[in-house]
Amino acid sequence: MKSLKPARKLDYKLQLLSEIAPSIGVDAFEAFKNDLYMIKAAGPGHPTDRILLRDGGWIEVDRSGKTGKTVRTWGPAGRAQVLAAALASKLGVEVEHLAKAASFGADSGALKVVKLSEDTIKDLASWWIARGYSATAAPDGAWVNVGRSRIHDTGSRLTVHGALTDEAIAATITKAKDAWSGGLSLHGSWTQHEQDRLWIAAQRAGVEIANCSPSKSIQESWRREQGRVIEQTRTISAARSAIADAADIRDAAGGDLEALNRLPKPLQAFVISHLDDEQRKHLSGQTVADITGALPRFRGLGADELAEYERQGRQFVAPKPHRRDHDRENENAYSR
């Protein structure tokens, strides 16, 4: 039997590349056939096409049109720039190159060049994916999408390509906290503004940062921020204490001796000495919210009662309750 066969088998990667820019045609990509290492077509979780060349250069093509078509590159300069220019020309856009902007290491040993195993690379990508990031495994490590920037992770070192955005800083802090035992070291040249942003982000996360010289102004800003946190904590603690006192006053007014003993002396005196039986009965039916607002006045009235005891040369002692079977409705629960 005779059959017809194509003159040549269409290379799978060239086919994927031609689908990214159909108007160019397969033949125009023949010159890049040996440069292509991996093509990851757009799909769920990553709305862009990503192309990795054998020299380590990356190309990303966003054809969605949501924010306008975009062609961007990162990684080593080389063939990626040539191919990106061809794609951008057909899409009618300029190529955006994400230049290397920053480098972080887990420690001084992070500067060593090591060959990563395939399993290690897959583990790195999985580590980021498990934390909600879009990451791609490549021969030289994992590449992570963080907003408009990209992070190159080799395990003990991160390199940011593109702007040092808040998202990139947050991702770096996450790596340091979860994978580098809560510490990181800066490498290369850093502006004062970049050091300040990283330093205060590290302080807020409890991460130690080495080779970083924060400005006096950012350190003072951190001290003020800490002061506000301490004051807010005190305020919350005081509010909780007030609510607890209000609940105890209500219960003590109903004859609960344990609640009475938890109250400070002025509030004990208010319940026992200032109020009469009818007033205590009425107070025991009030809400904690209502009592909380009246606490300052109750304390003042209780303090007056204590002062009167002292003026008369007597000592205030909370009386024993006269109650049966924890009967909270028992009138005359306290003796005068």
Image (spheres, rainbow, N blue to C red):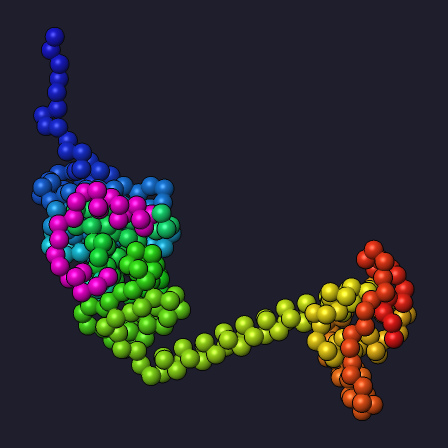
Classify 198 as above or below 324. Answer: below
Which of the pair 20/321 is nearer the observer? 321
| Number of marks present in the image shown | 0
> Would residue 90 be visible to someone looking at this image?
no
Look at the magenta stretch and give its main secondary structure: helix
Residue at figure coordinates x 36%, y 45% from the top left: 45
Residue farthest toward the top in the current orientation of the protein: 1
Which of the pair 67/132 is nearer the observer? 132
Image coords of residue 152 (percent x, y): 23, 55
Question: On the rendered structure, is 205 left or right of 307?
Answer: left
Segment colored magenta: 106-129
Residue at figure coordinates x 31%, y 81% from the top left: 215
The quarter of the rendered structure image containing the C terminus is bottom right
Specify whether residue 98 is painted magenta.
Answer: no
Q: Quadrant of residue 217?
A: bottom left
Which of the pair 11/56 is nearer the observer? 56
The quarter of the rendered structure image containing the N terminus is top left
Image coords of residue 38 (percent x, y): 19, 42
Image coords of residue 208 (percent x, y): 31, 68
> Would residue 261 be visible to someone looking at this image?
yes
Classify 35 as above or below 144. Answer: above
Which of the pair 244/288 is nearer the observer? 244
Classify 308 as above or below 58. Answer: below
Image coords of residue 111 (percent x, y): 15, 62
Residue at figure coordinates x 37%, y 51% from the top left: 131
Specify whether residue 107 is painted magenta.
Answer: yes
Question: On the rendered structure, is 224 left or right of 260?
Answer: left
Residue at figure coordinates x 12%, y 20% from the top left: 5
